[in-house]
Image (spheres, rainbow, N blue to C red):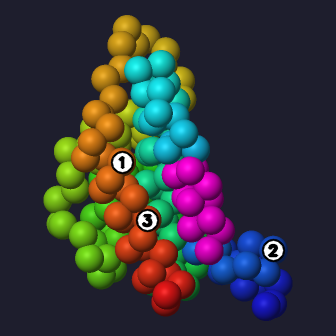
Amino acid sequence: MTAAESRRGDTLGGVPVYMTYLGSAEAFLRGADVLAEKHAQTAIPHAFLVAHTLECLLKAYVAKRLGGDKELRKDAKLRHNLQALWARAHAEGLDVAPIPPGWVSQLSQLHSDPYYLRYSTGVNAIVSPGLQPMMSELQQLAVLVRSVVTGV
């Protein structure tokens, strides 16, 4: 790896950047599984972890297809917008429905600007998606992305 490749967003510490996204997604998914067991008490942190897991999964796929994440980091519309990332992953060939499930759309509104899950200023309440089918569909997506990104 050259220094130029590292600066382009192709690798992070010698590891392909798409693998760092995948590793992060899988770690966050394990945390989301733990929080799901106490969902009534952890709905907001759970929604945050699920949204970030989804963001990392979609970025792992797109970064693999593009050979890095420079475009993902550069395009403000793709940074945290789960619906836009879903559409981009689908356009790049990910075998998902062209229209994301309702839970993705709901999380996207909370996860993107103005980032209600992070900074709930001026908000009286946050309604997060229900556990199912969100968790089972997220786990299926994680398996799909892992198989495509790693080839196994």
Instruction: Count the marks.
Output: 3
SS for dot 2: loop
Residue 71 position within the rendered picture, expressed as x and y whole percent measured from the top left: 51, 71
Residue at the limit of the structure toward the top, as seen here: 124
Q: Specify whether 26 is left or right of 131.
A: right
Residue 18 position within the rendered picture, expressed as x and y whole percent measured from the top left: 58, 74
Disc number for residue 13: 2
Q: Are marks 2 and 1 in contact (CB under 8 Å)?
A: no
Dominant secondary-structure state across the stretch colored magenta? helix
Residue 3 position within the rendered picture, expressed as x and y whole percent measured from the top left: 82, 84
SS for dot 3: helix
The span picked out in magenta is: 19-30
Q: In this view, does 51 lie above or below 24?
A: above
Question: Looking at the image, which residue is at 33% across and 29% down?
Answer: 128
Residue 11 shows in this picture: yes
Front one among 50 and 80? 50
Question: How many neighbours does mark 2 have within 10 angstroms: few (below 14), some (14-19), or many (20 or more)?
Answer: few
Q: In this view, does 88 lie above or below 30?
A: below
| Residue at the disc numbered 3 | 142
Disc number for residue 135: 1
N-term mark: 2 or 1: 2
